[in-house]
Amino acid sequence: MTEEDSSAKMSEDVEQYLKLNPPCSSSSSSSAVAFANKSGTFKSSSPPCPEHVLENVLENVLQFLTSRCDRNAVSLVCKSWYRVEAQTRFEVFIGNCYSLSPARLTHRFKGLRSIVLKGKPRFADFNLMPPNWGAQFAPWVAATAKAYPWLEKVHLKRMFVTDDDLALLAESFPGFKELTLVCCEGFGTSGIAVIANKCRQLKVLDLVESEVTDDEVDWISCFPEGKSHLESLSFDCVESPINFNALEGLVVRSPFLKKLRTNRFVSLEELHRLMVRAPQLTSLGTGSFSPDNAPQGEQLPDYAAAFLACKSIVCLSGFREFRPEYLLAISPVCANLTSLNFSYANISPHMLMPIIRNCHNIRVFWALDSIRDEGLQAVAATCKELRELRIFPFDPREDSEGPVSGVGLQAISEGCRKLESILYFCQRMTNEAVTAMSENCPQLTVFRLCIMGRHRPDHVTGKPMDDGFGAIVKNCKKLTRLAVSGLLTDEAFSYIGEYGKLIRTLSVAFAGNSDKALRYVLEGCPKLQKLEIRDSPFGDAGLRSGMHRYCNMRFVWLSSCVLSLGGCRDVAQALPNVVVEVFGSDGDDDDDTVTGDYVETLYLYRSLDGPRKDAPKFVTIL
Amino acid sequence: MNLKETELCLGLPGGAETVECPSKSGVGNKRGFSETVDLKLNLQSNKQGPVDLKVNGAPKEKTFLKDPSKPPAKAQVVGWPPVRNYRKNVMANQKSGEAEEAMSSGGGTVAFVKVSMDGAPYLRKVDLKMYNSYKDLSDALAKMFSSFTMGSYGAQGMIDFMNESKVMDLLNSSEYVPSYEDKDGDWMLVSDVPWPMFVESCKRLRIMKGSEAIGLGTFSFLFVSLSGSFFFPIMFLLLFHPIGFQLQERWRSSRTDHEQQKKNKDNMH
């Protein structure tokens, strides 16, 4: 067989392989075929063996594949494709840090430049998980430090990161560019200082809703002198004063800085100075948005002028301690704003109106319920491009006054037809309003409604909220994330199981009547990946009904339900690739075994490497 | 034992509370498990039986067992509504900021001090005004740092003194004692000055190894334990023991060294 013949045969083989690919990579497969057909015309100095040619072809093609979904599919085709895919994957996403060991990661992928790691499950944010449960970054940084010296980007969510980890990171990766820590803890300003000082190529340092200990280190001064590469600096969650002069100096020497989110220790005057220095900013976190001290009679800084000068600002947040009289200073940028976060500002409808009526281009709007239904109506009237809305409670208690209701929700649904994502906290709601939203906003992919009073029915009809949520799953055909609340019977879950075919994340609290509800969901939702349930009457039978699914899910969380140790053990024994953790909520058990049969919290997840070795005493792995 | 009073908060002063708690003014239940601890006591007694929650009663207010058409009791539940602690802290801080401005005098309601423990990876903060006695504080500290002492000291946690001979061992041991920095910047062992006076003068807490605590100015030791409630005034041991004075001198000079080293370390960054 000549080289031409073998290449031609290889093209046929490739074509055959490619036919097995799922449709999502059809565009790449056609180009691969085209490429393969041409491969016969390539000349090289020595006759390449068939496998190498194929791998070269693949390498060239796969570099265009960025979607991890596609890459995962590609890697399943055959060993050769698996190998090539592993060589060409530069970004990896690990949705649960315990689903595999760091060693497995470094063994498979040799050329990673970017890692996204998520640790604790979301319910840990609400005190449902004792501290020191795990999700330490340490073993990951240790492994990647050796394996990927060219690592550029680390993005962590809900991980425990220490100052030592940050120091190791700074030392090990000379080309390190991006660090993002979301909802992390365990480190302080001294760790941040090391990053600032040692990562000379740093472009992104984003600390988002993380707990950062105040080690009384002036970390802003630790950025080296000379031009910096910084493009994004977010430290709004750092609860300690910063050296403003150093910050100003840093901003001056960061010509590429686009995103700056300051903390509440930056006053309005200081913000003004920063804006004057960095008119190229596109995203600004405004810090306290209140002046240091009373005006001294000199000319006040012209805040509106500063905003006018920052023509590129499209995203505003902060307003941590805002003074209403200064709020209008942001008016010059309102027309350009695509994202506005007022969710830490106690803004009344009266304060909101003059601002929001100019925000025609807003796509993302976060606010407190202090804006009331009237404020929501104003948003609905103007913000026709709205895609994402989040309304948080100013007073997050069950029995607080509820300034927003179904009225606001319905108004939004009528005004903002392109809405894709909503998170809405309220005290009372009606099925009618929820149904209206389901009909008016067919693009919804995320619907999270939190009726703060537990088991609250429709406040007008007194009926359960089943019909409203049923309408959502039925009419919003693109829905991938759903959080339910209020009085719900098993019927609501039967709707979810019947219609929620694309749902990946489901959050349930204080809902349902029996195991049937859980069964409906586990049997009905084929795409379900993340299931978090608390305080609902689901027991062993419900848990068992999902056995066929758990290997294909990222995790299941069940707390304060009606599970027994025996039932959880059954799952653990039947599914060796699933780790079943059981623990109490307080973590003070001196025994390292669960006493009695009652299971307070069940957290199960698939894992390639078996149970973790770092589980604290209060966790029992079945 | 009213465990709710010992609940620790990492949040900032004052303000609205998400947990029903009669004497509390603190906020931000980053790791506040008072509700769950309280409920744990219920749970313990229920754990032995077979799983039948209808019989055992309801940990954490299992309202699904009750008639759903009746609204449940108004007691707050852990982690509900599901608002992140970070957000709750920020809002509470704002509300207290407003409250503090309304109040003309400052510092009336809270006395936050940092607490560090040798060997622990991060600092914590406690509001001394939340406690009414050394015992409350010691219980809280023990609970807060129990996870760090567990490894070496087992269930005993911090010091548990039953007899005097162990006191001398303390000075040489690696057990932990709490010390505090007073208004004058001196480090003292947490002692038996009247509690309100202690709250006024304490600026910072440090839980240090017993061997380093030698010579700290004090009239007596305070010993804490996880299980017990001991309070040992041992004034004669330190005050009158001839070695005590020499050790004080040695300690003071070593402290300034330590501070200097720390400053140097900070300056290097």
Image (cartoon, coloured by chain):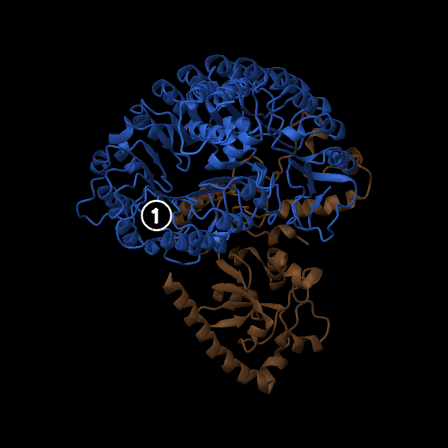
Chain colours: A blue, B brown
| Subunit bearing disc 1 | A
Image position of A536 with respect to B140: above or below: above
Query: Which residue sits furthest front?
Result: A1
Image position of A64 with respect to A276: above or below: above
In this view, the residue in front, B146 or A301, is: B146
Q: Quadrant where the C terminus of chain B lies?
A: bottom left
Residue A535 shows up from this direction: yes
Question: Image quadrant of residue B63?
Answer: top right
Q: Position of residue B126 (x, y in %)?
A: 53, 56
In this view, the residue in front, B237 or A87, is: A87
Q: Position of residue B161 (x, y in %)?
A: 70, 70
Labels in figure, total: 1
Left or right? Give the position of A39 relative to B207: left
Q: Residue at x 42, y 28 (%)?
A: A64
Q: Residue at x 47, y 20 (%)?
A: A29
Query: Which residue sits furthest bottom?
Result: B242
Image position of B195 with respect to A436: above or below: below
Name the kind of residue labelled 1 in the image: Gln
Left or right? Give the position of B192 relative to A319: right
Mark 1: secondary structure? loop
Mark 1 highlights which residue? Answer: A201
Q: Position of residue A438 (x, y in %)?
A: 51, 15
Residue B66 shows up from this direction: no
Label 1: how many residues lie within 10 Å, few (<14), some (14-19) or many (20+)? some
Q: Position of residue B105 (x, y in %)?
A: 40, 55
Q: Quadrant where the N terminus of chain B lies?
A: bottom right
